[in-house]
Amino acid sequence: MSDFWNDRYAAPDYAYGTAPNAFLAQQLRLRQPTGRILLPADGEGRNGVYAAEQGLEVHAFDLSTEGKQKAMQLAHRRQVAIDYRVGEFLDLGYHEDTFDVLALIYAHFPAELKKAYNQRLATYLCTGGLLIFEAFGQHHLSYRQDNPKVGGPGVAEMLFSTEELRRTFPHFEVYHLAEEAVELSEGTFHQGTGSVVRFVGRKL
């Protein structure tokens, strides 16, 4: 997968734009968390850079060296600092009970790994930490078939349902959990109406 993402991020333009994900930005404004935030699969850094602009201490990772390069360029332009690592997250040295916020924004891991990976990532949150999640939902394939420009995985097993997220994150107070049809306008690869699952919760 690193080759796929390196190819996508090698283009001069930012594949998903430089503006943050709208739901993440909304939730950070609404809940105003402080401290350290972890952003898995942060790609070209649009979300990590935005979080740094809001005063959070940003830690991000991805498989793509091209993504990191563009993320650091964006951070330099916006005059913020981010800690961005490249590799499989289990090898990157993160520890349990370390972060105040975990932002899983379109972090679509392989189907056979996604539950275990997401549960492991949740252990990195401190008690009372905030989880903000947005990814394509179980009903997304029909939207993708009608409009391939909306993007997202073409494999049903990589998509999410609300019940799956309840099972994956059982030890959270749920503030928001829904699958919703939303209009996406994020760079070249998220354009049009798609079905997304959105989850916000506080770790108990």
Image (spheres, grey):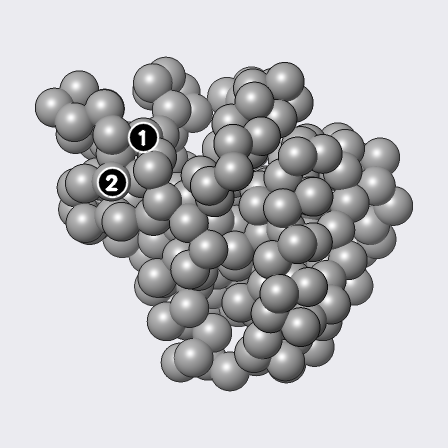
Indicate the amino acid at tag 1: Gly
Return the residue at label 1. 151
User: Helix, strand or loop at disc 1?
Assistant: loop
Q: Residue at x 63, y 18 (%)?
A: 3
The furthest residue to the right: 93
Residue 23 tag number? none
In the image, taking residue 96 as reference, residue 46 lies left or right, namely left
Residue farthest front in this picture: 12
Question: Which residue type carries mark 2?
Answer: Gln
Considering every residue shown, the one lying at the far left of the view is 146
Helix, strand or loop at disc 2? strand
| Residue 162 higher or lower than 116, as above or below | below
Residue 30: quarter of image? bottom left
Q: In the drawing, does residue 155 fall left or right of residue 11? A: left
Residue 159 can be seen in this image? yes
Q: Quadrant of the C terminus?
A: bottom right
Mark-to-mark CA distance, 1 and 2: 7 Å
Q: Who comes first in sequence, dot 1 or dot 2?
A: 1
Q: Nearer the viewer, residue 73 or 100?
A: 73
Front residue of this view, candidates 95 and 146: 146
x%, y% of residue 44? Answer: 57, 45
Q: Residue at x 25, y 48 (%)?
A: 184
Residue denoted by label 2: 191
Q: Residue at x 47, y 44 (%)?
A: 14
Q: Residue at x 82, y 50 (%)?
A: 94
Tell whether label 2 touches label 1 (CB within 8 Å).
Answer: yes
Percent from the top left, x then y, of residue 197?
A: 32, 46
